[in-house]
Image (tube, helix red, strand yellow):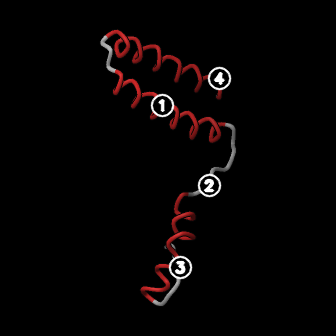
Amino acid sequence: MVILLILLYLAVIAFEVPPLVKQKQTRELFAFTVLMALAIAISLPMALGIQLPNPTDLLVNVLGPLSEAVFGEKPHLW
């Protein structure tokens, strides 16, 4: 599964990057690189069965005290 995922990413990169380089679209190439790196960083651990942290937990821990100060109760998730 991981090999297939890597091959898929390489195919997308091989298809998308050469026209961007040829047309000297550096901003688009930078955005593509950042988004592709983010996609790879998220999907490969998931394919390997590694549990990724939930971003909602971070928001609750960071903003929870503010919510408690303003509303007088701890935030809860449904």
Q: Nearer the viewer, mark 3 or mark 2?
A: 3
What residue type is disc 4 on?
Answer: Ile
Mark closer to the observer (3, 4): 3
Mark 3 / mark 1, whichever is N-terminal? 1
Between 49 and 36, the one lying in front of the other is 36
Q: Which mark is residue 53?
A: 2
The crowd level at tag 3 (other Cα within 10 Å; few <14, some 14-19, many 20+) is some
Q: Amino acid at mark 3?
A: Pro
Q: Position of residue 60 (x, y in %)?
A: 53, 70
What label sits on residue 3 in the rendered view?
4
Q: Is residue 32 left or right of residue 61?
A: left
Q: Are marks 2 and 4 in contact (CB under 8 Å)?
A: no
**Mark 2 and mark 4: Cα distance apart in space:** 24 Å
Name the residue: 48% across, 31% down: 36
Taking the spot 47% from the left edge, 86% from the top edge, the residue there is 69
Q: Secondary structure at mark 4?
A: helix
Q: Is residue 69 depicted above or below 48 in this figure? A: below
Callout 2, which amino acid?
Pro
Label drawn at residue 36 = 1
Q: Residue at x 40, y 11 (%)?
A: 18
Instruction: Kindly indicate whether the residue at mark 1 contacts the one at mark 4 (C-beta within 8 angstroms).
Output: no
Question: Is disc 4 surrounded by few (<14), some (14 to 19) or many (20+) residues within 10 Å?
Answer: few
The kind of secondary structure element at disc 2 is loop
User: Separation of disc 4 and disc 1 at Cα?
Assistant: 17 Å
4 or 1: mark nearer the eye: 1
Quadrant that contains the N terminus? top right
Mark 3, residue position = 65
Q: CA distance from mark 3 to mark 1?
A: 35 Å
Q: Is residue 10 left or right of residue 46?
A: left
Mark 4 vs 1, N-terminal side? 4
Q: Quadrant of residue 3?
A: top right
Tell me the element at label 3: helix
